[in-house]
């Protein structure tokens, strides 16, 4: 089924997936809180079982509130080609569902570094137990991916763009081309990009995964994930979800749908704030390095400009000094809250060394590329002038 055609992404973010004829004439979609669905008689049940009739059956296999939001996400990710979406309990659940579905025992998966840490942990621990081997190669390097392919065994390439925390951006068309030559499926975790800034399916990537807990919901108030791709593969993944059980509940789907109404507006502001803050930081004498794809100094600036409409609200930067110097800057910030996550309306700040990589020593962190003086700032939708003024005072010498 082709997605509804809306000329603009802002319009699709408000309307796609929702029927013009509103239930109960209410402008907001109903939250269908039902664990199961009734059949009028046995004949209707038989019509459903034989595939003659499409309808809901049981909550783990589908829900009307969830389906409407899935249709909207598919329309945002793939405005011109048929696509479908599968909502999941969380971003991690979306990733684990894809990998469990597509990686048989004895197969091999290629991952890239500077990625979401739990994804690598899942592959190293649980998938290894199921007899799936893996290689981790450098982020944003299609050549390294090509070199890691084990012909006949490699079934999946799982990468991210932009990556976390260095916001590396891979050449999507190059990855898709390499994968096609070897009949390997490609998955991009594009949580940091969102369909506002980048649409990997248009470059030939097979599946896009997002943690909806970040920009898509946008309000730091829910956990959900989504997998988007061509309808046949999403149908197959829906079957897997029916077995694994990691569904998105209707109330969460409603909140996500509500957050999506302002998605385009929020992303425009996140992009503006990220760019303004990155430019400010790049000129500051107490900042030794800024990692932001919208800056010409970023190693992937050229490909990011070609593939992306904007570069998001997350800016990673290194302050002159050590762990304590960065802690002092973070502690002096008054606007951003110290918290994991990003992509919400409120600005958040964290030091990867104290958050996701706390249990490692300085040396172990350095070995995986996490520097102690690194700060990751997620610019919310506040005024850029306030964010910059806050950074200015936080970076000032005591
Ligand atoms: C947050 C995040 C995830 C995990 O998503 P949850 O919704 O927290 O499970 C996966 N990948 C990336 C890039 C993320 O930022």
Image: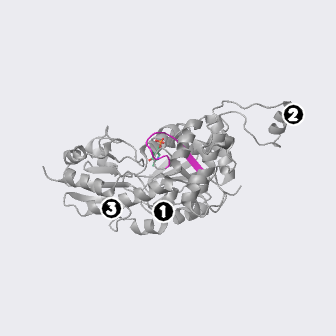
Of the numbered discs 2 and 3, the one sitting upstream in the chain is 2
SS class of the residue under badge 3? helix
Specify whether residue 185 is in view. no
236 sits to left or right of 208: right
Q: Nearer the viewer, residue 89 or 96?
A: 89
Mark 1 or 3, which is nearer the eye?
3
Q: Which residue is mark 2?
A: 43
Q: Nearer the viewer, residue 10 or 299?
A: 10
Instruction: Find out whether the residues at labels 2 and 3 contact each other: C-beta distance under 8 Å.
Output: no
Q: Is mark 1 within 8 Å of ligand 1?
A: no
Cα distance between the residues tagged 1 and 3: 30 Å
Q: Which residue is mark 3?
A: 276
- Find the residue positioned furthest to the right: 43
Magenta residues (range): 216-228
Count of numbered tags? 3
Q: Nearer the viewer, residue 5 or 203?
A: 5
Cα distance between the residues tagged 2 and 1: 54 Å
Instruction: Find out whether the residues at labels 1 and 3 contact each other: C-beta distance under 8 Å.
Output: no
Q: Which mark is residue 142?
A: 1
SS class of the residue under badge 2? helix
Q: Is residue 203 placed above or below 120 in the rendered structure?
A: below
Q: State the image quarter where residue 25 is shown.
A: top right
Of the numbered discs 1 and 3, the one sitting upstream in the chain is 1
Q: Which mark is residue 335?
A: none
Q: State the image coordinates of residue 259 (x, y, percent, origin top left).
A: 51, 46
Question: Which residue occupies 63% across, 46% down?
Answer: 68
Looking at the magenta stretch, what is its main secondary structure?
A: loop
Q: State the image coordinates of residue 373 (x, y, percent, origin top left).
A: 25, 50
Specify whether residue 55 is in view. yes
């Amino acid at each position: 089924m082709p997605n509804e055609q809306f000329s603009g992404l802002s319009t699709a973010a408000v309307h796609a997936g929702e029927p013009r004829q509103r239930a109960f004439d209410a402008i907001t979609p109903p939250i269908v809180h039902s664990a199961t669905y009734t059949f009028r008689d046995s004949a209707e049940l038989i019509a459903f079982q034989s595939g003659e009739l499409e309808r809901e059956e049981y909550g783990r296999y589908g829900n009307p509130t969830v389906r409407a939001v899935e249709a909207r996400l598919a329309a945002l990710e793939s405005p011109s080609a048929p696509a479908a979406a599968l909502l999941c309990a969380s971003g991690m659940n979306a990733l684990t569902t894809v990998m469990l579905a597509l990686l048989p025992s004895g197969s091999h998966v290629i991952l890239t570094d500077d990625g979401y840490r739990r994804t690598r942990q899942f592959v190293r621990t649980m998938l290894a137990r199921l007899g799936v081997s893996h290689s981790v190669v450098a982020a944003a390097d299609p050549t390294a991916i090509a070199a890691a392919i084990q012909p006949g065994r490699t079934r999946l390439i799982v990468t991210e763009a932009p990556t976390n925390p260095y916001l590396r951006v891979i050449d999507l068309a190059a990855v898709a081309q390499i994968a096609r030559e070897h009949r390997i499926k490609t998955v991009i975790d594009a949580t940091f990009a969102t369909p506002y800034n980048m649409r990997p399916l248009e470059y030939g990537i097979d599946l896009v995964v997002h943690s909806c807990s970040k920009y898509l919901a946008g309000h730091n108030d829910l956990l959900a994930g989504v997998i988007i791709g061509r309808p046949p593969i999403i149908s197959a993944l829906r079957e897997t979800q029916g077995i694994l059980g990691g569904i998105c509940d209707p109330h969460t789907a409603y909140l996500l749908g509500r957050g999506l109404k302002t998605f385009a507006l929020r992303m425009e502001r996140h992009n503006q704030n990220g760019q303004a803050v990155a430019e400010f930081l790049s000129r500051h004498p107490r900042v030794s390095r800024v990692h932001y794809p919208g800056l010409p100094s970023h190693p992937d600036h050229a490909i990011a400009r070609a593939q992306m409409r904007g570069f998001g609200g997350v800016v990673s930067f290194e302050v002159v000094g050590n762990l304590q110097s960065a802690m002092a800057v973070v502690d002096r910030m008054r606007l951003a809250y110290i918290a994991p996550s990003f992509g919400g309306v409120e600005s958040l700040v964290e030091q990867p060394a104290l958050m996701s990589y706390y249990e490692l020593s300085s040396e172990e962190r350095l070995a995986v590329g996490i520097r102690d003086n690194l700060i990751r700032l997620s610019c919310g939708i506040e005024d850029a002038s306030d964010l910059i003024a806050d950074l200015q005072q936080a970076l000032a010498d005591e």
